[in-house]
């Protein structure tokens, strides 16, 4: 027997919309689902945004309950519904595309409708009983998409930044461990891919650690700017439609609900229209991607070979590298990091264009801004963990190759510059490039320093083979 699905009719300003009777979203979210099927990325794929929206709505309900803007019963039901979303429940109800017109109105109204229906269920009433709890009149009371959504995307981006910073901390520690392990292993330092001066492999990996650690620190500093919000400003920052008592409390309640040092922006009108903080934060994500990709490229170079390249380190063998060349193993993890970094650069470009395109008192393109920031932060977080777990933790040094590359170079000629001057040292270096033997070149052109260079080379050899 086929059972017909029970339906209900909800109404919005454009008229009736038919929905499943048990559906948590309402007519405006349903219209958005029909209008926007573009990116294949859903709001439900962005849990930090859903939690942030619920936190904003909970803070508003708390403020309204204190100022008698909502009855205790209605406010309590809304607060309880928000807690369900904050706890990770019902996120699948946000089944609408992140790429949407309307400056985020569809997402805000989805939150209003879902929270209203969850609150009605808590009161023992059916979804859609909006004469008791209405999405606009109760859940969205004293609010506008333009302060709610703008605040929520800041909270979501801030939390993702903290998650990414923690992943960078872990990656930096992995580099530091290798730096300590390779501390006594001399090798050739290179500039512009040419032989330069001696260094240790440990110094090279310790530098990777320092760069990554610095990115984590800077990321935390920059993301803190996201906690200055325009909540209470409603449509354009003037606070139209919000009671003064509510406006005085709502940001403080949001700080309590989130446990974050949220504060009101100095100028709510400016904060409503200006998306410069997202450009700043996106630039920081681009910086992280740039440096992570540069390190990944260095690992590819250092491990190149295994016979025809530098070959000074060996990366973990993750998978066969060719369908035709037997034995070939590619540096697939560093290459994947390069790939995701290029995508992050594209996300940054999208944020830049979207921020520039804002007009007068509002930026209509905040949905693509948070979509891009979310994608970039997720890619970088996963990339940092993958680089650590699948590559850096398993890197092994090749002391013999490090020693050979150093011994066959002219790097030690730099040791002679303070004693012989640049010109004579350069003559020796050029002679060594032709003869292939630096020590012999020193004996020929500056015999009084041959023992000095021999001792330097011997010390490096001893360290390499100790």
Image (spheres, helix red, strand yellow):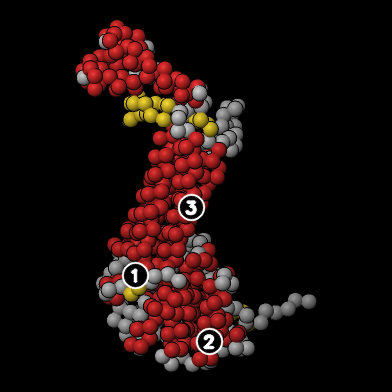
Q: Secondary structure at mark 1?
A: strand
Q: Are marks 2 and 1 in contact (CB under 8 Å)?
A: no
Q: Is residue 291 above or below residue 325?
A: below
Q: Residue at x 39, y 78 (%)?
A: 252
Q: CA distance from mark 3 to mark 2?
A: 38 Å
Q: Is residue 361 left or right of residue 189?
A: left
Name the residue located 38 percent from the left edge and 50 percent from the top edge.
215
Label 3 and label 1: CA atoms lie apart by: 25 Å
Q: Quadrant of residue 103?
A: bottom left
> What is the spatial separation of the Cα atoms under label 2 and label 1, in whole angstroms?
27 Å
Which of disc 1 and disc 3 is earlier in sequence? 3
Please name the residue that numbered disc 3 is placed on.
Answer: 167
Label 2 belongs to which residue?
Answer: 76
The image quadrant that residue 91 belongs to is bottom right
| Percent x, y of residue 169 | 46, 51
Circles 3, 1 touching at the beta carbon (< 8 Å): no
Q: Is residue 97 visible?
A: no
- The quarter of the image holding the N terminus is bottom right
Residue 374: image location, x then y, percent: 45, 60
Q: Which residue is tagged 1?
A: 228
Question: Closer to the N terminus: mark 2 or mark 1?
Answer: 2
Q: Is residue 3 left or right of residue 142?
A: right
Rendered image: mark on residue 212 = none
């Amino acid at each position: 027997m086929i059972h017909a699905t029970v339906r209900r009719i909800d109404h919005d300003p454009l008229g009736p919309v038919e929905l499943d009777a048990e559906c948590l979203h309402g007519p405006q979210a349903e219209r958005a689902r029909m209008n926007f099927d573009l990116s294949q990325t859903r709001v439900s794929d962005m849990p930090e945004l859903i939690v942030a929206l619920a936190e904003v709505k909970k803070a508003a309900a708390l403020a309204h309950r204190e100022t008698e803007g909502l009855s205790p019963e209605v406010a309590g039901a809304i607060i309880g519904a928000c807690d369900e979303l904050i706890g990770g429940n019902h996120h699948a109800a946000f089944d609408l595309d992140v790429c949407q017109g309307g400056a985020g109105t569809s997402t805000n109204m989805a939150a209003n409708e879902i929270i209203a229906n969850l609150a009605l269920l808590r009161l023992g009433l059916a979804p859609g009983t909006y004469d008791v709890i209405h999405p606009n009149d109760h859940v969205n009371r004293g609010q506008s998409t333009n302060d709610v959504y703008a605040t929520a995307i800041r909270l979501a981006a801030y939390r993702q930044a903290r998650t990414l910073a923690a992943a960078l901390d872990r990656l930096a520690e992995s580099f530091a461990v290798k730096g300590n392990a390779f501390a006594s292993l001399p090798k050739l330092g290179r500039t512009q891919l040419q032989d330069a001066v001696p260094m240790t492999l440990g110094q090279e990996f310790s530098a990777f650690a320092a760069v990554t650690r610095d990115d984590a620190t800077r990321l935390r500093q920059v993301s803190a700017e996201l906690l200055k919000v325009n909540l209470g400003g409603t449509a354009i920052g003037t606070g139209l439609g919000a009671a003064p008592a509510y406006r005085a409390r709502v940001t403080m309640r949001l700080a309590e609900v989130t446990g974050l040092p949220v504060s009101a922006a100095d100028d709510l009108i400016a904060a409503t229209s200006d998306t410069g903080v997202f450009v700043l934060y996106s630039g920081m994500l681009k910086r992280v991607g740039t440096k992570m990709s540069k390190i990944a490229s260095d690992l590819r170079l250092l491990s190149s070979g295994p016979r025809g390249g530098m070959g000074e380190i060996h990366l973990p063998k993750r998978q066969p590298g060719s369908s035709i060349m037997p034995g070939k193993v590619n540096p697939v993890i560093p290459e994947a990091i390069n790939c995701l970094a290029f995508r992050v650069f594209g996300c940054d470009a999208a944020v830049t264009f979207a921020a520039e395109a804002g007009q007068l008192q509002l930026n209509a393109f905040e949905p693509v801004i948070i979509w891009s920031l979310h994608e970039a932060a997720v890619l970088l977080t996963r990339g940092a963990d993958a680089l650590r777990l699948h590559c850096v933790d398993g890197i092994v040094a090749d002391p013999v190759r490090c020693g050979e590359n150093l011994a066959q170079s002219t790097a030690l000629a730099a040791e002679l510059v303070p004693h012989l001057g640049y010109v004579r040292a350069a003559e020796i270096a050029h002679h060594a490039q032709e003869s292939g033997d630096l020590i012999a070149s020193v004996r020929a052109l500056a015999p009084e320093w041959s023992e000095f260079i021999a001792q330097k080379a011997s010390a490096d050899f001893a360290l390499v083979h100790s």
